Image (cartoon, rainbow, N blue to C red):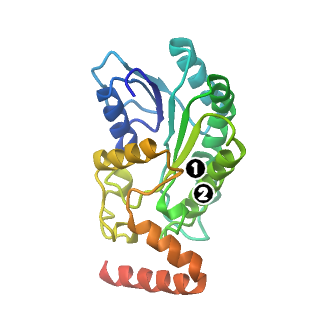
């Protein structure tokens, strides 16, 4: 990947920061896009641009900045996200925030990125979703629903651009040690262990090397998907029992 141009949204911490560190070490030109610049990488190949991925104009400015500087994009990690806990009574504000971050940001990115990749005849779009988008997050209805939508969006993009020489992956980890999961080590998402961001990035690179659509850093997730698809009712009952067990142990 040396000399590749890599863009990372949500790059100020957690997964995004680990991605930036990894690809700077690989000799890439890395652009971090986020609302805040919390880490300054002392590397001539690193650039930061303040960007609000909820806003299409801000996304457009990001593309203008990258193309003016490098004239191409090789890898785009659409990574920004939040976790808002809550049930069906979650506020309209939480719904809108999750919807914009977990779906519409990818829509805005794709509107600019896909024409570039079609012209280049090469590129890689990686969307950070979650195992919650394949299964569910029992403590957050907004996170679960919007992460499902992110995966559905990635599937559509992959299916409808099969003839073009670029690739799409969706990253679906369970718990990763970030600010988002701080203090939530006993959550259901942590039952199979909590990955460190650097270890997650290694798993992501393995998926990129294999050009996998679905990157599952926690391999147990595939087993859960199989159980869910084979007997949905049984899976729902099992998840309800798991929720009860987690609540009792808190």
Measured from the top left, where is residue 169 in percent x and y? Answer: 53, 46
The tag on residue 195 is: none
Measured from the top left, where is residue 168 in percent x and y? Answer: 57, 43
Classify residue 176 as left or right of residue 154: left
Cβ–Cβ below 8 Å for labels 2 and 1? yes
Please say if 221 is above or below 164. below
Measured from the top left, where is residue 226 in percent x and y? Answer: 52, 74
Classify residue 176 as left or right of residue 163: left
Q: Secondary structure at mark 2?
A: helix
- Quarter that holds the N terminus: top left
The tag on residue 102 is: 1
Label 2 packing within 10 angstroms: few (<14), some (14-19), many (20+): many
* Residue drawn at x 62%, y 29% as measured from the top left: 117
Q: Earlier in the sequence, mark 2 or mark 1?
A: 1
Classify residue 59 as left or right of residue 184: right
Classify residue 97 as left or right of residue 33: right
């Amino acid at each position: 990947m040396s000399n590749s141009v890599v863009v990372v949204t949500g790059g100020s911490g957690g997964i995004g920061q680990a991605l930036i560190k990894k690809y700077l070490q690989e000799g890439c030109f890395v652009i971090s896009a986020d609302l805040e610049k919390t880490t300054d990488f002392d590397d001539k190949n690193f650039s930061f641009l303040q960007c609000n991925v909820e806003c299409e104009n801000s996304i457009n400015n990001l593309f203008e900045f990258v193309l003016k500087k490098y004239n191409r994009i090789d890898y785009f990690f659409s990574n920004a996200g939040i976790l808002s806990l809550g049930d069906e009574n979650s506020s309209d504000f939480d719904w809108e925030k999750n919807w914009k971050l977990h779906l519409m940001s990818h829509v805005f990115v794709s509107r600019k990125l896909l024409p570039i990749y079609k012209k280049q005849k090469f590129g890689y779009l990686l969307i950070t979703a979650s195992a919650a988008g394949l299964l569910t997050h029992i403590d957050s209805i907004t996170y679960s629903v919007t992460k499902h939508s992110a995966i559905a969006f990635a599937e559509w993009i992959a299916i409808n651009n099969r003839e073009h020489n670029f690739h799409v992956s969706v990253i679906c980890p369970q718990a990763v040690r970030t600010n988002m999961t701080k203090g939530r080590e006993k959550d259901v998402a942590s039952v199979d262990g909590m990955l460190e961001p650097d270890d997650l990035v290694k798993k992501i690179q393995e998926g990129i090397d294999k050009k996998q659509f679905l990157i599952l850093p926690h391999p147990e997730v595939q087993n859960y998907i199989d159980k869910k698809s084979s007997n949905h009712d049984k899976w729902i009952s099992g998840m309800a029992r798991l929720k009860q067990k987690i609540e009792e142990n808190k």
